[in-house]
Image: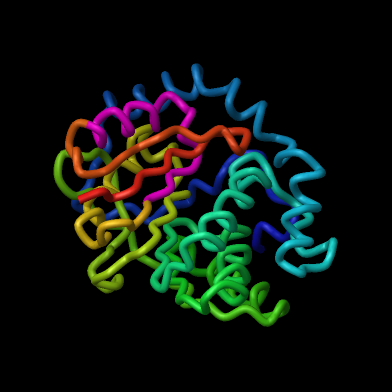
Amino acid sequence: MTSREATSLLARNDLDWPIEVRRGIGEKLHVVAFALIQWPWLLRSLSGGDAGDRARLLGRLGLPADALPHLGSWKADAGFLNLLVDHIERTRPQQVVELGAGASSLVLGRALQLHGGGRLTSCDQHGDFVVATRAWLADHGIRADLRATPLVPAPGDWPGIWYDSSLLPDRIDMLVIDGPPWTIHPQVRGAAESLFNRLPVGGTVMLDDAARPGERIVAKRWRHRWPGFEFRLCHAGTKGTLVGTRMR
């Protein structure tokens, strides 16, 4: 199953936790607490964005009307996807890395085909989802390097588990972060900073769901730790996107 099909309201939670990582009761209670305060963001995201934004997205990518039938909830929405295409049209990145595959993989892959022919490397923790998403892209003539990526202990002082990034490109022009799910820990995506040194000056990081409380904490820490980046919160989608550009 891919995000082409209708899926459950919440993200899959059948994660293969590394044996050396153990979640204590404190971390579990932390996740529960954020679940209680994040429900307004989930409700706003159910629609998948404005119907006009979706139609505009499909038109500018030359995709049929049924190419993206199910957006919203834990999946990317039309506003965020249009923002990704805007950036690719403007900057024509040659190496794009995506964390969390799905509808965004289809959109990124097509946009790169149309604007500069860059390479997409996409990681997801679910092997069956990667296989199905690869077939979905192939149905539309889109090629990308989609990888079933194991989860390892998060680097640095970030909580939970994180993608094994050892085989990702040394240079990343555009880093798109839409995984792993917050149910691991509300600040789990903060570990993406372990890839920031691979971005050249002018390189961009885009964090989806950035208006949520957990991601706001992540953004605050990134701004403090990475003064060479300029960060701004963009409200193009229903859940907000943090856009960071490396300035030096």
Residue 5: give x, y in percent of width and height.
74, 58
Q: Is residue 25 above or below residue 60?
A: above
Residue at image coords 48%, 28%: 211
Residue 202: give x, y in percent of width and height.
32, 56
Q: Is residue 247 magenta?
A: no
The picture quadrant where one finds residue 22 is: top left
The picture quadrant where one finds residue 31 is: top left
Residue 27: give x, y in percent of width and height.
29, 29
Left or right: 188 in relation to 198:
right
Q: Is residue 165 above or below residue 73?
A: below
Residue at image coords 49%, 17%: 37
Residue situated furthest right in the rendering: 65
Residue at image coords 37%, 53%: 204
> What range of the chain is rendered magenta?
205-223
The residue closer to the viewer here, 158 or 22, is 158
Screen quadrant of the N terminus:
bottom right
Way the structure is coloured:
rainbow
Residue 191: give x, y in percent of width and height.
27, 46
